[in-house]
Structure formats: C-alpha cells, structure tokens
Amino acid sequence: MGNNRNDGHNTTLLVSIHPNLGLDGDTRQSIVGILNNALANEAVLTTKTRNAHWNISGTNFFELRILFGNQFKQLNNISNEIAERARMLGGFAIGSLEEFLAHTRLEEQPGDVPDILRLLADHEASIRFLRQDARKCTEEYEDEGTFELLVSVIRMHEKMAWVLRSHIEPELNHGENRVTSFNTSVPLRIVHPAENRR
C-alpha cells in the first residue's frame, strides 16, 4: 500500500488519472487537437499584434500603441483559457514556437510589421475557424463545455475586430477615398487625399 503513495517521498511513481467527464478518450483527444489549433492561431495573432505594438510609428502612435497593447493582453488571456481547457480534458497544451507554426491556420509574415487591416483580417479568419470548431465540438463531439469556451472566444475576437474596423472606418470613408465595404483578406492601401492630388 505504501508503494502506491506519491506524496513527494516517492518521486519516481507516476500516476495518470484520466478525466471522467462523459467523453471517451478518443473524443477528448480530438477536442484537444481542435483546442491546440485554436491555441496556435492565438499565439500567432498575439505575436503579430505585439509586433504592431512594438513597431508602431506615425501621427497615431500613442493611440495605436494603447490599442495594440490592450489587444495583445486580451489575446494572452484567451490563450490561457484555451490551454487550460486542453488540460482539463486530459491533454497537453502545445507551447513551443515550432508547434504553434505547425498548428496555426493563420498566415505568418516574417519581416513585415502588421497593419490594422492585416490584424483585422486575422481576427476575422480566427472567427471563421472558431465557428467551424465550435460547431464540430457540439454537433460531432457533444462537448458543450468546449463549445461555450469557443463561443466566448468568438465574441472576444468579434469585439477586437470591431474596434480595429472602427479605427480605420474614418480613413476609408474620408473624401474621395470613400469605400462602403471591403474584403479584409485582400491587402488594401489607404491613400491619403493629399496623395491623390500628386
């Protein structure tokens, strides 16, 4: 009986207790895979947002620095929630840069400082991936806990996307450059009215 204790005295004893949550092992591992893909997306978007925060310059420096700083802190919190859910299901949360790049569905752009449009496009792509994942969790795996987490993450990304979109709308609707809608998956160069006169 004493050999089964692991109270710090017998540190070589490994005991694995699988969660008994009404989800079988294969289902839990499939959900952990979904969570790790989402976690990789969050890590890449966090890094891109931090890159924008560190390298911002221009007339809106202070405003954008605060905006990007707040958003990468929110993204860090989202990552923590997703990683904790993977652990709750008995899986492991990926945590290396190599794993993040292998699992992400977002495009990495080394050497470029992301602008608001690129970050907005990544938030919207994340939302689309999360919607697919949330639907799969509830319809295929019957995991309402992960479904609810992913829905809450969708709402946070929708809010961050709305803030970014609201920040650029005045520029897009200004004077001769008025744009009523745009596809954020295609890069858009905002031309200042003074440039049009050149």
Image (cartoon, rainbow, N blue to C red):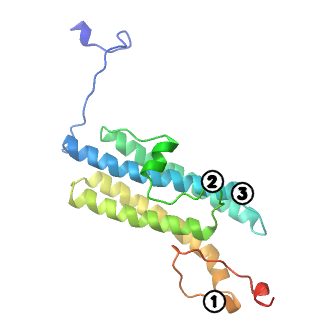
For label 3, the SS is: helix
Please state which amino acid type lies under the numbered disc 3.
Asn
| Label 1: how many Cα within 10 Å (few below 14, some 14–19, many 20+) | few
- Tell me the residue that label 3 is attached to: 55
- Tell me the residue that label 2 is attached to: 50
Residue 133 lies, in percent from the top left, at 33, 59
For label 2, the SS is: helix
Query: Residue 69, located in which quarter of the rendered image?
Result: bottom right
Residue 173 lies, in percent from the top left, at 64, 86
Residue at the spot 52% in from the left edge and 53% down from the top edge: 44
Residue 30 lies, in percent from the top left, at 27, 48
Residue 190 falls left or right of residue 129: right
In 3D space, how far apart are the residues under numbered discs 1 and 2 (Cα atoms)?
A: 30 Å
Residue at the spot 48% in from the left edge and 63% down from the top edge: 157
Residue at the spot 68% in from the left edge and 59% down from the top edge: 66
Which is nearer the eye, 140 or 152? 140
In 3D space, how far apart are the residues under numbered discs 3 and 1 (Cα atoms)?
A: 28 Å
Disc nearer the start of the sequence (3/1)? 3
| Residues marked 3 and 2 touching at CB (< 8 Å) | no
Considering only vertical position in the picture, is 40 above or below 165?
A: above
